[in-house]
Image: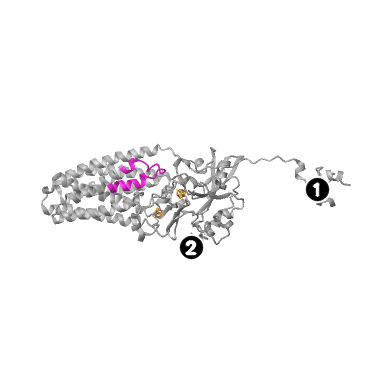
Amino acid sequence: MTQLALVIDLNVCVGCHACVTSCKEWNTSGEAGPMSDQNPYGADPSGTFFNRVQTYEVGEFPNTETVHFPKSCLHCEDPPCVPVCPTGASYKRKEDGIVLVDYDKCIACKYCSWACPYGARELDEKQQVMKKCTLCVDRIYDMSMPEADRKPACVKACPTSARLFGDVHDPESVVSVAIREQGGYPLMPEWGTQPSNHYLPRKKTRITLHPDELVRSDNPLKADGREPSTNGNGNGPTLEDASNW
Amino acid sequence: MHPAFSVIFLTTLIGAAQGLFLAMVAVQFHVGVNGFAAPEAVGFYAVGSVISLALLGAGLLASFFHLGHPERAWRAAAQWRTSWLSREVIVLPAFMGMVFLYGVAHWQGMPTLLPALAGVVLAFALFVCTGMIYACLRFLREWHSPLTVLNYTLLGSASGFTLATAFATFSAPHAVRFLGGWAVALTAAAFIGRLASLIRNARLKPKSTLQTAIGIKHPKIVQKTQGFMGGAFNTREFFHGKPVATLRAIKWFFLVASFFVPLLLLGFGGDGAAIFLILAFVIQYAGLLAERWFFFAQANHPQNLYYQSIA
Ligand code: SF4
Ligand code: SF4
């Protein structure tokens, strides 16, 4: 059974919000209707988003790390938001595990949003229906698009490739491999919701650099004496100078 | 959670209506229909049913204000297999229908046993549905307890019996003492139940933390941005936004108004002094509005962990 999901790499997310804007752009333009904004240019702007990027500071100064944390519906394998819905507007698709809201059935009772521990659902104040991430269900199966584009808009937009998309039930998929090999974890595992989306942890990145790795000895610009050489003040001989009369 | 007035009115109004109905049936089985002269029976049971129906109707009306698409409300009956809200949506009109039949049966002098028994079953079913809507949400830990269902039942019954006592001074004076006794007992039981849940909730330790919310195991994590500068559904729906002092004041108000004052007034009005009994109901109802507000405000949703700092 397929379970589509996102894997978000907190180690490379730079918090640029490209996924947020690209998600909003794609999903506000679809046939499901716009994702309304209230007061977009006023004092207290507010709007409907499927995806938010938050920022946390971990640790104590000066040993702090900034963690950017993209947050959207996790398409739980056992989604508590679905059984509580009185109308059946909220449902989980059998074929690919995507949790969706049928906007034509939703009565905006907000009960599902109470039942989601992650706050992943947002009521569209104008349309008065519950909204949430659809994993771009109207993109990923669109055969009129080139195959490379059949991915959620956020995944396509991410400049650092922090967002991976695939089937977490297929052990060889890019997402399963990432979860397995890079310590992917779910959010709030204590509630047994079994989120399909996973997060990859931050890791320490260290590299050792030797001085001669910083300067290319065969730098062509060196030929006219403009560019640095390796003696530290920029005009000493290089190995090539010595071997290349 | 942000207390919604639609839901506060819905739950308190139908609770009182269910209690009133149970009170009428209790009187019926206690004194037997024959204990009443016919016109008196019409006055108590038929008019009582009308009052109960009016409260239920007002509650139903209030509930529509909670919905973004009230015109589609009929769809809410669809998922009764899994959703307590859906079950409530079915049981509430069924109960209303039964109260109507019960009133008509008394008014027309027809047999009332069947609508009385079916009504009692539906009244309790409705208490269970209403309570379970909240009690079934496992991560809203203040609600996730059998006490929630018990208290919905006791609080609704207490206010309904108080109302029935006040009403009986006009329509069935010889039932006042019986009803008043029950109103006192139920109000006292409701006080114990509510106190138990207050004590339980005060001792709850949160299961989710910022650490489990973002999955970083470090004791010191501070949120720097929540992703937007203005408001959002997440910051409106799940926060009551009132200072702790307000919460505490409302708690004391509801403890006094829903339990102590009505108990005193029920004592004074035991011999049928209508003014005390009417006051008892009005004050108790006001107290229950505050109680319900507090019930919602006190519930701390784990999603709030993600919304602790704006910029
Ligand atoms: S993250 Fe929330 S809205 Fe999404 S499937 Fe899980 S419980 Fe439902
Ligand atoms: S708000 Fe809509 S989707 Fe959510 S529980 Fe109510 S009807 Fe279902």
Whether residue B276 appears in this view of the structure is no
Q: Is residue B190 above or below residue B104?
A: above
Mark 2 beta carbon near ligand 2 (under 8 Å): no
Q: Earlier in the sequence, mark 1 or mark 2?
A: 2
Whether residue B96 appears in this view of the structure is yes
Q: Secondary structure at mark 2?
A: loop
Residue at (22, 53) in percent of width and height: B99
Residue corresponding to mark 1: A218
Q: How is the image coloured?
A: one colour
Chain label for disc 2: A
Q: Position of residue B308 (x, y in %)?
A: 50, 46
Q: Position of residue A152 (x, y in %)?
A: 54, 55
Q: Secondary structure at mark 1?
A: loop
- Give the residue type at disc 1: Asp
Residue A31 has which mark? 2
* Residue B101: quarter of image: bottom left
- Residue B123: say if magenta: no
Q: Residues within 10 Å of mark 2 (few under 14, many from 20)?
A: few
Q: Which residues are magenta?
A: B125-149
Q: Nearer the viewer, residue B266 or B202?
A: B202
Q: Residues within 10 Å of mark 1 (few under 14, many from 20)?
A: few
- Residue B148: say if magenta: yes
Residue B72 has which mark? none
Q: Position of residue A192 (x, y in %)?
A: 44, 42
Q: CA distance from mark 1 to mark 2?
A: 57 Å
Left or right placement of residue A131 versus residue A237 in this view: left
